[in-house]
Amino acid sequence: MYRFHPSVKWDDGYPSRNKIVEEIRKLWRRYDLEEKTRFNTKAEKVYKDAQGRWIINDPSHGRFEGVMPCIGSCGAPNSPTLPGENKFEGTIFHSSELDGKDAKDKNVLIVGGGASAVEALEFAVKNGARSTSILARSDKWIIPRSPFIDIFLALNVFGQEELLAWIPETLLRIFFYRDLKDLAPTSKGLYTDTPMVNTDILEQIRAGRASWLRGDIISVEAKGIMFNHRAQGVPKNGPGHQKLVPGDMIIMATGFQKPSLSFLPEQCFEPPYQPPNWYIQVFPPNDPSICANNCTYVNAIGTVGNYHIGIYTRLLLMFLVDPLTRPRPVWMKRWIRMTRTLKQFAPTGAFDFFTYSELIYWFVFVTAINPFRWKWALFVFFGIGGRLPMRIVEGEEMLRNGVGKKRA
């Protein structure tokens, strides 16, 4: 499970909502965030005053030098209506509503094949379901929950499907999928979509406690779902074997809607520089005082945690307090075009998929390209040593002011 702070420790891979809220409250108290938070306040517009300071909705909330949208990548539950679902005699829930639900001795049907489906599968097995079937329209790569394998797969600094990508894909089929190679994607490369990180799911299938069915939902019936089970490599809605998959509970693991950044100024969405096609993916090229931290993400592979969020945050702080490090719009756009050129043969958009090693390369590049940013390197990458570069900035400011007075 994603760790949003270095001090957070989870007892299992998918902590409950209550456990997550408990950890958030600990951080809340530690950093005295109560006084700095406005609850029940929707950000409807963000704009600048005459002095270039940011205003959120209206001046009553204050004026700010920088803005950091942190709305995440998951908004309201995406709950499509299934054909004939009103005939179902069991219960239907979205995967976000599982806390407190009872799956004991039930036949559970999970609609969807992404990370939410894996979480729903673990819920069903943990709660003693009689059987669990995942009904997925397409194949998705599954990789072991191992930091070493995760780091190895993320070493592709090119951040795209390239000539040597068949090597890790073949190794996964041989040593991880093994007798379940039929579940591995054949038409989708590993470096095109976010893989599911789970070690147990294939073992659950081998043990007969779960099944993974590739195909299309035809209709929901009173006792289950009529399903067109397709063979590996057959496209969506292609020929297959139609059968009724029995179930007492349907879990809609259909993901979430993408939260909107529409409250930001229109200049942030100037074609062809709409998100995620921003400077290192989070800074709109027309204004580096905005950092949309972790909410322009589409797909990636690699270690996840708080590390990159901290780097993005400290880059924003550096840009705000040190004018000489602040990128100009023209250079931000050039970096975006350069990245597009480097990834022009990628099957995805240049910023629609990245690896963690590519992300680290981005950070190193934008820090090294400007000598005035070198003094901030330890602070940007590790959060230490911020006082020394700040004193240098103060000296530079005094020097500029002194030169200005002499010229006057």
Image (tube, rainbow, N blue to C red):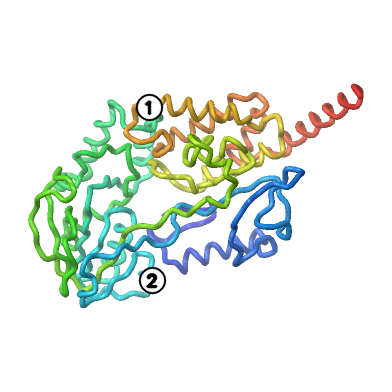
Q: Residue 157: name its quadrant.
A: top left
**Location of mark 2 (residue):** 99
The residue identified by callout 1 is 344
Q: Could you say where residue 231 lies in the image, as x and y percent from the top left?
A: 11, 48
Mark 1 lies on a secondary structure that is loop
Count of number-bearing discs: 2
Quarter-of-image position of residue 391: top right
Q: Residue at x 61, y 62 (%)?
A: 28
The answer to whether 143 is drawn above or below residue 12 in the figure is above
Percent position (x, y) of residue 76? 43, 61
User: At x 26% / y 47%, what residue is drawn?
Assistant: 140
**Which residue type does callout 1 highlight?**
Gln
Residue 390 placed where, x, y %? 74, 36
Task: Measure the alpha-carbon separation of dots 1 and 2.
Answer: 44 Å
Which quadrant of the figure contains the C terminus? top right
Is the residue 101 above or below the residue 403 in the image?
below
Q: Position of residue 74 (x, y in %)?
A: 44, 56
Secondary structure category for the residue under label 2: loop
Q: Amino acid at mark 2?
A: Asp
Q: Nearer the viewer, mark 1 or mark 2?
A: 1
Work out whether residue 152 can be spotted. Answer: no
> Which residue is farthest top?
407
